Image (cartoon, coloured by chain):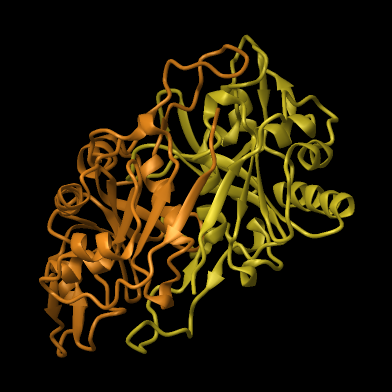
Chain colours: A yellow, B orange
Amino acid sequence: MSRPIEVLPVHGIGEIQPGDDLAELISKAADLRDGDVVVVTQKVVSKAENRLVDIDPEIGHKALVERESVRVLRRRGDLIISETEHGFVCANAGIDLSNVEEGRAALLPLNSDRSARRIRDSLKHRLGFAVAVIVSDTFGRPWRRGVTDVAIGCAGLRPVVDLRGTTDALGRELQVTEVAIVDEIASAAELVMGKAEGIPVAVVRGLDASWLGCGSIGDDVVRKPADDLFR
Amino acid sequence: MSRPIEVLPVHGIGEIQPGDDLAELISKAADLRDGDVVVVTQKVVSKAENRLVDIDPEIGHKALVERESVRVLRRRGDLIISETEHGFVCANAGIDLSNVEEGRAALLPLNSDRSARRIRDSLKHRLGFAVAVIVSDTFGRPWRRGVTDVAIGCAGLRPVVDLRGTTDALGRELQVTEVAIVDEIASAAELVMGKAEGIPVAVVRGLDASWLGCGSIGDDVVRKPADDLFR
């Protein structure tokens, strides 16, 4: 029997500075429960981890994008679609110019799965129970207009749930097998974050407990170039 | 001030037969409120609209996929990634073999935006107030493993919310502009549907009221080939 889920914005996190302890801020601002999934945006993780860099005014942020890319897939005007060293394919190597000071840019965390694990471990220590943590970012898609939030790091959650071997309502084996619940949770969280409102954290409550467990975005979600039809 | 949202599975819809009145079944099974967004899976819409066809056992479903495609982007083994006449780029032209009788397949609705409008109009007539309706389907993504649910039709909702011109928390204009909330809502709904449990409808409650309005997937989300870097 499927249960309702709730998506709760976490108010009061405030502006993040390099060195800030996100777990401390989250544990104070959110009333967390066992089994919750905490979604934290890339931007505040990058800020807390001091992934801020200066943009050389002579050459703009394009040189940064090139430096942070291992493979450029497409260019059009100022837009570069590239693959980052983490294996993410996204616009401008995930470099963020909004919500940071003029002349500065926020790079992606070095390893967002590790960032998620660190926040999760610290929250567990503070709370005495376990929550899952997702680091989310905003990516475009080919073929469809508009951006959506996806997960670039996670801890305490199986990112892709394999429904292979389960049967559909008519008793036949299902065709569709692996659901990227981690990205669906990141998207759900985005709906309460509101880009301009400064809500960098949301809690998703009531998810299937069997989805909690181990896994990472690097191992379970990033598709290897050899398995990919569009690289 | 951002508010929480709820995602509610709708139990008791049962197996859908060609000709079934989805709005009637939904209005009986769900306790809907003004401003709710009702997400209905493609499969039950296709069944209700009798988009079921026989699969020729001699040639399998591949001929059907070819017939339902206007452009093939990639092939690997049995998998075909193609563009449908609606402009969707997806696996096997969106043709569904699970949850339909052996030897039969469910094609996409002829026009899922129209399907959504029809369900919405009928619900409005029955309820006396307006809800938004999304028809959802399960698509894969390049570069990332696992499938997620997206919207293939909608009514009563602005599918893409334009944040251009709004400013971030530091007063600077935002870089990220257009959020495909319609796909994020479809993904959120999938989290309570559970492929094998036969829950084809979910309600998302508490979304920003300013997102209600006009728009369609065909006009607002499907990217035209000329604007697309991956076709």
Let me know if residue A71 appears in the view.
Answer: no
Where is B118 relative to B206, above or below? below
Residue B196 or residue A173, whichever sits in front = B196
The image quarter containing residue B105 is: bottom left
Residue B166 rendering spot, x and y as whole percentages: 47, 17
Where is B222 relative to B147, above or below? above
- Residue drawn where x is 40% and y is 57% of the image: B149
Residue B175 rendering spot, x and y as whole percentages: 50, 23
- Horizontal side, residue A170 vs residue A224: left or right: left
Residue A163 rendering spot, x and y as whole percentages: 49, 76
Where is A197 relative to A68, above or below? above
Residue A194 or residue A96, whichever sits in front = A194
Residue A110 or residue A39, whichever sits in front = A39
Where is A37 relative to A103, above or below? below
Quadrant containing the N terminus of chain B is top right
Q: How many marks?
A: 0
- Horizontal side, residue A178 vs residue A34: left or right: left
Let me know if residue B95 appears in the view.
Answer: yes
- Residue drawn where x is 19% and y is 67% of the image: B46
Residue A43 or residue B69, whichever sits in front = A43
Residue A65 rendering spot, x and y as whole percentages: 59, 30
- Residue drawn where x is 54% and y is 42% of the image: B4
Which residue ends up furthest to the right in the rendered image?
Answer: A125
- Horizontal side, residue A184 vs residue A11: left or right: left
- Residue drawn where x is 57% and y is 25% of the image: A197
The image quarter containing residue A76 is: top left
